[in-house]
Image (spheres, rainbow, N blue to C red):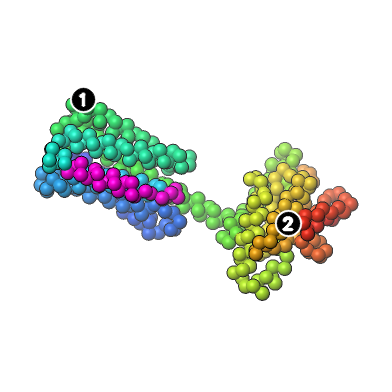
Amino acid sequence: MTNLDPRSMIAMAGFMSAIMAVVLLFMRRHYPPSIRGVGAWAVAPLLWLVSTVLFSARGVIPSWLSLVLANQLLVLGALIYYMGTRHFMGHRFDWRFWGWIMAGSTMVFVVLTYWFPSYTLRVGFFTVLMGCIYVAQLRFMLRQGDRSFPVRLVQVVLAVHTLVLAVRLTSILIGKGGSDLMEPSLFQTLYIGAYVLMVLMLSIGAVLMATDRLRTELEHLATHDSLTNTLNRRALLARCEDELERAQRYGHGPSIMMVDLDNFKAVNDTRGHQHGDAVLVHFADCTRQVLRRADRLGRYGGEEFLVLLPDSDTDAAMVVAQRIHATLATGHALDCQVSIGLTSWTGSHDTLDAMLSRADAALYRAKREGRNRTVVASEPIQAPRAAQAGSAQTVACD
């Protein structure tokens, strides 16, 4: 293993950096702007590529290129990768702090290259500096990252390479760090080999994280209404079917509310479609605020929405309906009135089509009887009952 040529291994790292940079740049060009950080992830391996070229030319080019600049490009690449990770996860990067770190480290490398030349001190300082950057990124990802495989992969790579840096620092302290980077010693070979794998795995991790985010966004677009960010009709009906299957197993079914914005066509005709869209968004935001985490709101079509209330009987659903009426009567400029048709699961014989039909009939009656009210459709036939929610009324129908 010690017969491996360090220059060849460094060249391999440069080749891998070039390939991954091209892949990430291609992704940056074709992925949506909402996936941030990909550009920084593409720049990082480019910096590592230039650094490996400078390292490989040691002895041929001046020391300020092959030592000072080469080391600083490795550090800068690690910082750019860290910046990309923070941007990807929706956080800003404090360049003011890390800029001072870069400026100070540059001065240290200059001093240890020209004024007090010391390979051991230079490598020791570089090892500590890179370890601090990896620990900062690992700490950030453990706090802000999710539990997906790509994020875990990057976390493991950072942790393993931090451990490698700790071993390298220990070897330096015990006098086994060697006298030159190109020395074909065991420790140098292990370190450079670990660096080659780190470059590859961090780049692969970035690709996987961006791809996973793209898949999530595409799934969201496929299941959500683009204007109100509620579930679309197909996705919501699928959730309803799932809930009815669960009701068949456990005997506790959901309630469904068909909600229609009153006089919405007049709003569009008199105030314009942009104002109408703002009203729809406001309604969806207000309604989500009064729903439980397990409840689902979806756009059924136009200004008509459907609310799924898992494991809720009629009384519980009526409370939610009253809250919807109340939250839309607070005096906001975009407040609107709604009519609601409500129905609850009646037993193992009940189907989604039947529930939707009852809710639609109840909604139609709410419109016919004056709007801005909730009508409850129930089986078997019950006596009408009303509940007041601000100016809204609640009645029952069969």
Which x, y percent locates residue 300?
Answer: 67, 59
Q: Residue 346: percent from the left, percent from the top?
A: 79, 46
Q: Can residue 308 be seen from the camera position used here?
A: yes
Tell me which amino acid carries mark 2.
His
Q: Is 23 in front, or is 261?
A: 261
Q: Is residue 228 above or below residue 82?
A: below
Q: Residue furthest left?
A: 60
Read off the residue under disc 2. Answer: 325
Which quadrant holds the C terminus?
bottom right
* Image: 231 above or below 72: below
Write down the region rendered in magenta.
87-110
Q: Main secondary structure of the magenta part?
A: helix
- Do residues under tags 2 and 1 come within 8 Å of each other at their CB atoms? no
- Left or right: residue 87 versus residue 266 is left
Please give the name of the residue rendered at 67% of the width and 50% of the height, measured from the top-left corner: 290
**Which picture quadrant has residue 177?**
top left
Magenta segment: does it hold 169? no
Calculate the distance from the C-alpha at mark 2 to the C-alpha at mark 1: 74 Å
Magenta span includes 103: yes
Q: Residue at x 27, y 29 (%)?
A: 167
Q: Position of residue 100 (x, y in %)?
A: 29, 46
Query: Circle 1 sits on which residue?
Result: 174
* Callout 1 secondary element: loop
The numbered mark, 2 or 1, whose residue comes first in the sequence reads 1
**Amino acid type at mark 1:** Ile
* Rendering quarter of residue 178: top left
